[in-house]
Image (cartoon, rainbow, N blue to C red):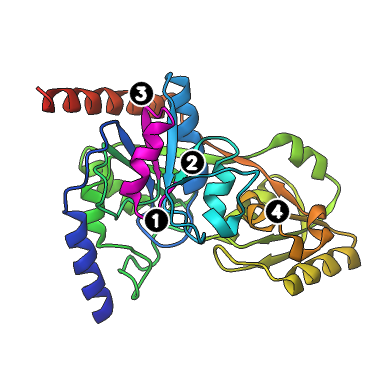
Amino acid sequence: MPLGAVYGAIAGHRLRRKGLEAGIPVLCVGNYHLGGAGKTPMVLALVKVLRDLGETPVVLSRGYGGKLRGPVLVDPDRHAAIDVGDEPLMLARSVPVAVARERIDGVALARSQGATVIVMDDGFQNPAIAKDASLIVIDAQRGLGNACVFPAGPLRAPLKQQIARTDALIVVGDGSAAKSVAAAVASQGKPVVSARIKADPALVASLQGKRVLAFAGIGDPSRFFRTLRANAINIVAERRFADHHPYSRQEVDGLIADAKGGALTMLTTEKDLARLRGRKDLGEGVDEIIALPVTLEAEGTRLQKLISAWLFDARDRKLRSTR
């Protein structure tokens, strides 16, 4: 608790700092806490909405887990997860992604790619770049644990200060663990949007009648397993690993042996497969592993209307500031 108080005071102070103006709208997708809540599917959902609005989004990421400091534009055919991180590599198959350890350095690269909007993948607590809107993702079943600041709990900064800088809360799935947070956000007049993770129907159909060994090294593996069971996928065995886990040859060989011994299909997340794909040191057995693509679907057209309004306001503010 004492360390959490110190960490929280520093993080809270950083939140109040004014960031660099990127010159184009910046929308940030983040979490209040450490670990996963559906942030990456939310980034892809936001990209889709922006494209539907006629925008050209470029994702800006710190490239957690990668060795390249950047700024660098992610190339899925040339880079591996060890270079740029698993999430940027996965996202780059759908949208241009600029990786920069110092996010300010990535702004110019994003704009050079013709970006009309920058989508920040994480970075809500980082003050380096001014954000025109911050969308915070929270899992309805996981919530915020004990709601204490790290290392006493999972929060990255004091909750009250984070809520004050929230422009919309995206509550993913069913459950009551996020109700108090949603009420606090709503009490400040900020929108709370319900969303669901939807598994790819074609892959779900192909797995019907099969026995599955499911494994995941993400922030919340339980959410992945819940999604599988909600789609009537028969999980015979499950394996959990730490978030961004760098799989070893021994671990992969063990998974393959367990799957063959039980005549099981190996199934993981797209983020995990991004870390496994292309690694020759893991052997040919990696080719037998399949990933479950998922999308995040928000309620109705509310998200699109919110984003359209944020973009209009952001451009209006930037125009007035130049006069």
Q: Which label lies toward us, 3 or 1?
A: 1
Image quarter where the N terminus lies is: bottom left
Residue occupying the point 71% across, 64% down: 238
- CA separation, marks 1 and 2? 13 Å
Please, which residue is most extreme toward the bottom here?
2
Residue occupying the point 34% across, 50% down: 103
Q: Secondary structure at mark 4?
A: loop
Please, which residue is most extreme toward the left here?
323
Q: Secondary structure at mark 3?
A: helix
Residue under pointer 3 = 305
Image quarter where the C terminus lies is: top left
N-terminal of the pair, mark 3 or mark 1, is 1
Regarding residue 59, the answer to whether it shows in the image is yes
Residue occupying the point 82% across, 54% down: 288
Residue under pointer 4 = 277
Residue under pointer 1 = 101
Residue occupying the point 86% across, 47% down: 209
Task: Read off the magenta span.
Answer: 99-120
Q: Which label lies toward us, 4 or 1?
A: 1
Residue under pointer 2 = 97
